[in-house]
Amino acid sequence: MAAKLYFKQRVMTPGPTSVPEAVLLEMAQPIIHHRTKQFQAIFKELSERLQRVFRTTGPVLSLAGSGTTSFEACQICLARPGSKVIAVAGGKFGERWQDIYDAYAKTLDLTVIKLNVPWGQAVTAEQIRQAIEQNPGVSAVALCHSETSTATACDVESIAAVTKETDALLLVDGITSVGAMPVEMDAWGIDCLVTGSQKALMLPPGLGFVGLGPRAIQRLTDVKPQGVYNLDLRRWLKSWQKNDVPFTPPVSLIRGQRVALEMIEAEGLENVCARAARLAAATRTAFTAMGLKLCSSSPSDSVTGAFYPETTPAIDDKKFRAGTRDNFGIHLAGGQSGRGAEWEGKTFRVSHMGYVDAGDTLAAIAAIEAELRRLGHKVEPGTGIAAAAKALA
Ligand SMILES: *Cc1c(COP(=O)(O)O)cnc(C)c1O
């Protein structure tokens, strides 16, 4: 069946995610100049709302670019030149943070320690403690809270309890955790927390957010970031203190993000996270009932991944996802491949972040079941929905 553009579309990929109508309308407002009191008032309100969502009293910077732009800025600016850095990977995004450190290793004279865990497993606080002990002089530890490629979450609270006793700053990629799962930046002692606009924060792509704790701010004054201009966090921090940004910002996105955060705070951050957790639990129950194996032994509540069931012939990932999209308007993500595993074509993923409810989730489960059946998986119709409905009841 050909794609029908007038069909109801449900974007359930783990980024980008759907954007609420109120946010779309706000972004359609006429453009305003950014060096004005009007913009500064909007920016100030956005910054204050971001601080509440990040659960911090420190600065949360809004950078133009994607999540990668923001995390790269933190990696470069917070590493002490001439030191060691630890980069944890158990999936595609952790591997990206290793690659970024490698790209700057020469300029910043960094020794990059790669702590790899099997895909689908979470790094433990004990592994981080050992890596820091075995490598004296580590200045930063970078990891993903929710590794989206494998739908795996680690225990950042216990990891931060380890790093805060050392000289190593903890840089957390919270791109699919902030706004979807509990993250207590100040209470846990996270030094640097990053997210992007197009995941749980219900905005189109284009903004990245950087929360900085006291130790990270101190590091920015201690070290002189080299070989960096636009991504120099000191520049962004200085402007932020005046409710300003150093360069022309994506004004419409900033306006939209203010409204999206207003919606999150109106529902209550805890309720938003509880909704994601409920939808994730129902999805995991449904997948298991349908005979699917989950990707993770430590599943994230913002995204669920599963392996395709074994059938003869094997289920074709592209046909399956084209089927859920064209026949049901459900957009799913496929698997990803990296150094640690080849999951492209073998897994698929569905998001529970942001503007998504039980109806969307049940619709996705029904579409997944129908398309798996069409491609040869033997499962009784309604199995997934029945399991999910029981879990949601
Ligand atoms: C999406 C994602 C990224 C990359 O963000 P971009 O906005 O695509 O640069 C990084 N880390 C995680 C965990 C993600 O989910």
Image (tube, rainbow, N blue to C red):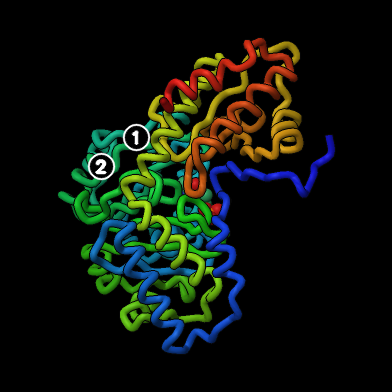
- Residue 87 x %, y %: 39, 46
* 74 up-or-down from 376: above or below: below
Q: Quadrant of the C terminus?
A: top left
Q: Say if residue 132 shows up in the picture.
A: yes
Q: Quadrant of the N terminus?
A: top right
Please state which of residues 375 and 282 is positioned toward the viewer in this rendering.
282
- Residue 62 x %, y %: 43, 69
* 343 up-or-down from 2: above or below: above
| Sequence-first tag of 2 and 1 | 1
Label 2 CB sits under 8 Å from any ligand 1 atom: no
Q: Which residue is labeled 2 in the image? A: 159
Q: Which residue is labeled 1 in the image? A: 123
Q: Say if residue 106 shows up in the picture.
A: no
Q: CA distance from mark 2 to mark 1?
A: 9 Å
Indicate the amino acid at tag 1.
Answer: Val
Residue at 32% of width from left, 57% of height from top? Answer: 54
Farthest residue, direction front? 393
* 279 up-or-down from 32: above or below: above
Farthest residue, direction left? 165
Q: CB of mark 2 within 8 Å of CB of mark 1?
A: yes
Farthest residue, direction right? 2
- Residue 120 x %, y %: 45, 29
Q: Is residue 30 left or right of residue 209?
A: right
Residue at 60% of width from left, 17% of height from top? Answer: 382
Q: Is residue 311 left or right of residue 353?
A: right
- Residue 260 x %, y %: 46, 61
Residue at 55% of width from left, 22% of height from top? Answer: 385
Q: Is residue 160 left or right of residue 172?
A: left
Indicate the amino acid at tag 2.
Answer: Ile
